[in-house]
Amino acid sequence: MSNTIVVAVDGSEYAREALRHAIRWGKALGAELVLVNVQPDYDTPNIRRFISEKLIREYQQDMADRVLKPAVETVRAEEPSIPVTAVMRVGSPGVEICNEAKERGAMAIFMGSRGMGPIRGAILGSVSYSVLHNAPCPVTIVS
């Protein structure tokens, strides 16, 4: 297990609060924060008929940057001593967050209880539910 905390970021207030908690834990534990944003996989045969793979990837990166850059700035402003890495993944958010944690041997995952999805009134969002039940490490869900 590495001294790494994976933080799922999607631009929601819950994710911002999870990031604030992760910063405190990262400082206390001397851990690196890996901020992960997962973009949908738009690279399907029907879409590729009209839009190039390059344009799809550029769009995904642009959307991820809109979330990741402010999150990285938050970490650097609040605790400049904490190492921080921003990662964009493509696919199913729950699966990709767990994969990132597994690949890095993360000690923990921090995430918001609900994100930017269509079912905002749910007690526990589908992504946080998926991560909670499939993560390779402890998960802290912040509301």
Image: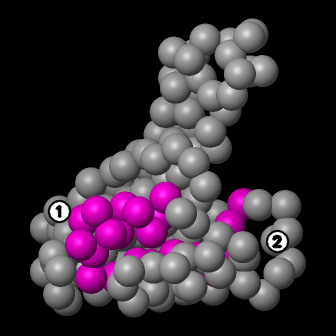
Give 121 or 90, whichever is nearer the viewer.
90
Position of 59 relative to 24 (above/below): above
Q: Quadrant of the C terminus?
A: bottom right
Residue at image point 45% right, 79% down: 135
The spot of residue 102 in percent (x, y) is 33, 69
Which segment is the magenta one?
96-116
Q: Is residue 116 left or right of residue 85?
A: right
The answer to if 110 sits in the magenta stretch is yes
- Please, what is the three-letter code of the amino acid marked with disc 2? Arg
Disc ID at residue 83? 1
Q: Quadrant of residue 107?
A: bottom left
The spot of residue 65 in percent (x, y) is 47, 40
- Please, what is the three-letter code of the amino acid marked with disc 1? Pro
Task: Sort mark 1 into few (<14), some (14-19) or many (20+) by Cα contacts within 10 Å.
Answer: some
Disc ID at residue 104? none
Q: How many marks?
A: 2
Q: Quadrant of the N terminus?
A: bottom left
Disc ID at residue 120? 2
Per the model, the C-alpha gap separating discs 2 and 1 is 32 Å
Residue at image point 58% right, 59% down: 93
Indicate the secondary structure of the residue bearing disc 2.
loop
The answer to if 125 sits in the magenta stretch is no
